[in-house]
């Protein structure tokens, strides 16, 4: 199982657009993801939360206050209430935009002519617990991406700081690649991923600057490394040098150019 659910190492890091091309467009909007795809992103990252009526929406924070025209806690609002808000105009280069559902983002990702991967991060309101993964997997099944033939062909990857969330996904969708995010010595050493069956580790760039050997150690155990959030040239070249598989960036366009000049 570990063999087939691991993603093979790439020739260079694949570029994952963190919340879309979120430096240039409002995060988690259709405009941010469309720009990322146009700029050549090979993966898209999103955070998902459950609404009061159990819909999966792409919002990072617990509340909508920072990224919309409204206020309130996402898990206490219905999708219809979220749809009344403007999630785009707060950004310097934004235009009015609707909240994005996971279904809408999956549709965009899967309709794109290239095999782009969607890295879906579950955020955990205490209120819902395991229901987040349960509904996420149901959605991935509905889109036909919950049981890929191999990790290399997988169009969805579930990522989380929560070991319990990763473990639930591995148990219920054993073919789906998973990334355990974190910064601890246990994560870098591999034992945290082993404990929950994660197929990859996801440290931040701050940690990987000081612990470059963690990438080779993960690869030796058949695990991929996903690093976030990598926006500076020196960090991009560092990641390429030490063999990071996926780098999440707010600037997918310029990072692709740095990795493939000319
Ligand atoms: O891609 C992982 C990264 O997004 C984790 O941090 O706070 O941006 O969700 P955060
Ligand atoms: Ca995230």
Image (cartoon, rainbow, N blue to C red):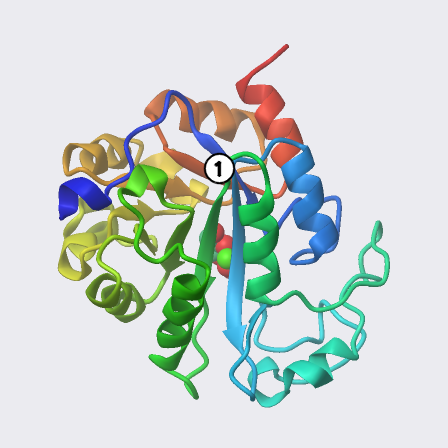
x and y, in percent, of residue 161 in the image: 36, 62
Question: Is the shortest distance between ligand 1 and the CB of mark 1 under 8 Å?
Answer: no
Q: Which is more toward the observer, 135 or 46?
A: 135
Q: Classify 10 Å Cα crowding around label 1: few (below 14), some (14-19), many (20 and above).
A: some
Residue appearing at x 31%, y 69% in the figure: 165
Residue appearing at x 43%, y 88% in the figure: 127
Work out whether 82 lies above or below 174. Answer: below
Residue appearing at x 71%, y 76% in the figure: 65
Give residue 261's quadrant in the image: top right
Q: Which is more toward the observer, 59 or 37?
A: 37
Work out whether 202 lies above or below 41. Answer: below
Is 98 on the left-hand or right-hand side of 249? Answer: right
Q: Is residue 22 visible?
A: no
- Give the residue at mark 1: 115
x and y, in percent, of residue 241 in the image: 38, 20
Q: Which is more toward the observer, 145 or 186?
A: 145
Q: How many marks?
A: 1
x and y, in percent, of residue 108 in the image: 61, 51
Is 142 on the left-hand or right-hand side of 69? Answer: left
Which quarter of the figure is the C terminus placed in? top right
Residue appearing at x 43%, y 75% in the figure: 124
Q: Which is more toward the observer, 19 or 132?
A: 132
x and y, in percent, of residue 220 in the image: 15, 32
- The local secondary structure at tag 1 comes to loop
Work out whether 106 lies above or below 201. Answer: below
Q: Is residue 119 visible?
A: yes
Give residue 88's quadrant in the image: bottom right
Work out whether 119 lies above or below 151. Answer: below
Give residue 197's quadrant in the image: bottom left
């Amino acid at each position: 199982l570990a063999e087939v659910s691991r993603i093979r190492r790439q020739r260079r890091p694949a570029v994952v657009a963190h919340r879309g091309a979120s430096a240039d467009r409002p995060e988690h909007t259709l405009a941010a993801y469309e720009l990322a795809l146009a700029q050549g992103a090979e993966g898209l990252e999103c955070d998902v939360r459950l609404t009061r009526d159990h819909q999966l929406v792409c919002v990072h924070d617990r509340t909508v206050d920072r990224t919309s025209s409204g206020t309130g806690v996402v898990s206490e609002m219905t999708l219809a209430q979220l749809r009344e808000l403007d999630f785009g105009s707060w950004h310097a280069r934004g235009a009015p935009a609707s909240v994005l559902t996971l279904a809408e983002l999956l549709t965009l990702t899967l309709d794109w002519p290239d095999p782009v991967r969607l890295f879906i991060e579950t955020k955990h309101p205490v209120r819902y617990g395991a229901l987040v993964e349960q509904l996420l997997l149901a959605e991935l099944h509905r889109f036909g991406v919950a049981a890929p033939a191999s990790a290399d062909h997988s169009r969805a990857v579930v990522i989380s700081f929560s070991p319990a969330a990763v473990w639930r996904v591995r148990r219920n969708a054993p073919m789906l690649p998973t990334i355990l995010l974190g910064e601890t010595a246990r994560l870098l050493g591999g034992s945290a991923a082993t404990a929950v069956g994660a197929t990859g580790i996801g440290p931040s760039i701050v940690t990987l600057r000081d612990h470059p050997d963690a990438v080779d150690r993960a690869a030796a155990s058949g695990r991929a490394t996903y690093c976030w959030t990598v926006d500076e040239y020196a960090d991009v070249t560092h990641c390429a040098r030490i063999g990071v598989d996926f780098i999440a960036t707010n600037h997918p366009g310029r990072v692709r150019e740095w990795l493939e000049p000319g």
